[in-house]
Amino acid sequence: MRIDFQQIWSTLSSVFAIGHQDPFPTVWSQHGSYPPRSGNDLEIFIDGQNAYREIAAAFHRARKFIYLTISFGSKDFLPVPGSGEGMFDILRFRRMEGVDIRMVIWQPADVTSDTIPNPAPKTILGVNDGPTCIQARWDVAKGYQGMYCSPRNHFEPFPVDFPAKLGCHHQKTYIMDDGGNGILAFVGGINPVQAYWDTQKHDCLDVRRVAKGQDLIKGLEGVPPLHDIFYQIKGPAAGDVLANFVERFNGASIRYADVTVDAVSPVTAAEIPQVPDGIEIQILRTVAPETYAQTQEGDRGIREFYFNALRTAGEGDLVYIENQYFFDHGIISEIHEAAERGAKIIALLSWKPDEGTRVGEVECVLEKIAHFQDESRLVAGHRNVLILTLGNSHPDPRAEAKTIYSETYIHSKTFVVVGRDSAVMAGGSANIAFTSMWFHTEMNIGFVDPVRIKAWVAQLWSEHLNVRAEDAIRLLANPGEAFTFFKEQAIRNELALEKGVAPEGSVYDRQSIDFPPRKLEGIAVVL
């Protein structure tokens, strides 16, 4: 199937020209791999402690199969640090009990400390080393060659040629049976790497975030606390997460055909019973063209979903974003258009994404190629756009009345549009970046459920603003008031940092804040 994006954009634009009172007929992606599915139960787990506690428990409950997709990862990762039980320890134990365990892992062009490159089976006990082993395949990503274009006239289309070495299989999913007759799927952004594990306190002195064998002080100084999310799905939509795994495992580049066999899906989405009073969920993907036989034309369903949702936003509505990156011409254009129509945009972005890393260097190059500065000027400073970041503070145990300040790394990919009587939300692995929207392999979920979405955003705001959940819900009902509250707290928090006193919350102006380096020498920290 050929996806004619120009025709899609032309059609959607003509529909929206009727005005905000006649919004798009649907936010769902019409050209993605999977349709929206009714009858699902959905839970949100904010930050690594909550997420991996549930995922580890699901590993232990499974009796038939556990399937994983991994981009970045560590063979020493502890999902529940206090237990001392590593993720691979759990998986090896479950495999010995007869559970079918498979994983598909991104094969990076450049090996980093946070990747598990082939031939890792030689170093991970129990992986691809016999007939009763954990079966793993590695997958080389695609690049992108073609036009970089957007549905508005803010940017001129131009040709790009990104080599495959810049591509990434960026999905993070876990799928397993629930110990009975059902299945569970976890979709999110938290890599199984110790530095990505964190609590909702985002304590810069929490040594549980430090990798095994690393010096505790150097580990804490080198990696900031991190905020992210996972979603748990029960119901038919979990079948699409399973179908994605089977497609990727069977189509992986490095197959280890002597010790692995193709996966056969134990159940399809259509065969999974609906959950009573469940909600509608769509599994959304980005897949580069010609990556897998079943998806020859590729899939840009995530980008389409964002477009559709943003085009419903106008006066009296709120767009709330948490993301690591912020450079995709199309999405930035639609954010600008929503702001022009009067929607309030609150975007929490990483302070300095991947600073000092190879990934960060590559992304900086991609930002320049994608004319990021042009995009930034389109939204930065707009009267209805607020671009913030997150930080944290801790009393300095070395000196009375002193405070340690740190950024909180935003790795969450949360996207929400809230109206008076409606709400749509998406989240998963995809950054607001040309890479994630065009040719990285990504997975998000999208859903429409005003009550649940507003409650979950209130949980996030309660964490970030240090307010009661009921006060966060009140702010959600008043986008203008929420916009002002975030803006004014960011100003007060920056003044608190300058004075060396504790801030009242966690939000800061991204453009003006300058977090000091974490200098922790002399602090006694123990596991």
Image (cartoon, grey):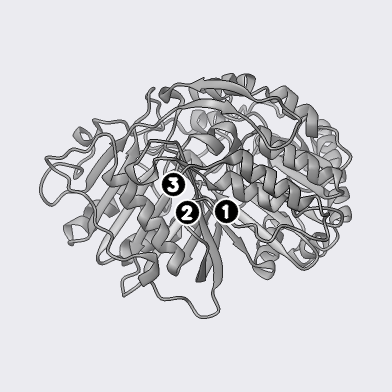
Q: Which residue is mark 2?
A: 187
For badge 3, the amino acid type reads Lys
Q: Earlier in the sequence, mark 1 or mark 2?
A: 1
Instruction: Tell me the element at label 3.
Output: loop
User: What distance separates the C-alpha of mark 1 from that of mark 2?
Assistant: 18 Å
Drawn side of residue 134 relative to residue 200, left or right = left
Query: In front of the other: label 1 or label 2?
Result: 1
The image quadrant where one finds the N terminus is top left
Return the x and y of residue 339 as percentages of the image width and height. Answer: 83, 44
Residue ID at (86%, 41%): 492
Return the residue nearer the eye: 495 or 314. 314
Question: Residue 172 shows which numbered tag?
Answer: 3
For badge 1, the amino acid type reads Ser
Can residue 406 be seen in the rendering of this structure?
no
Q: Earlier in the sequence, mark 3 or mark 2?
A: 3
For badge 2, the amino acid type reads Val
Q: Which residue is mark 1?
A: 29
Residue ID at (29%, 39%): 252
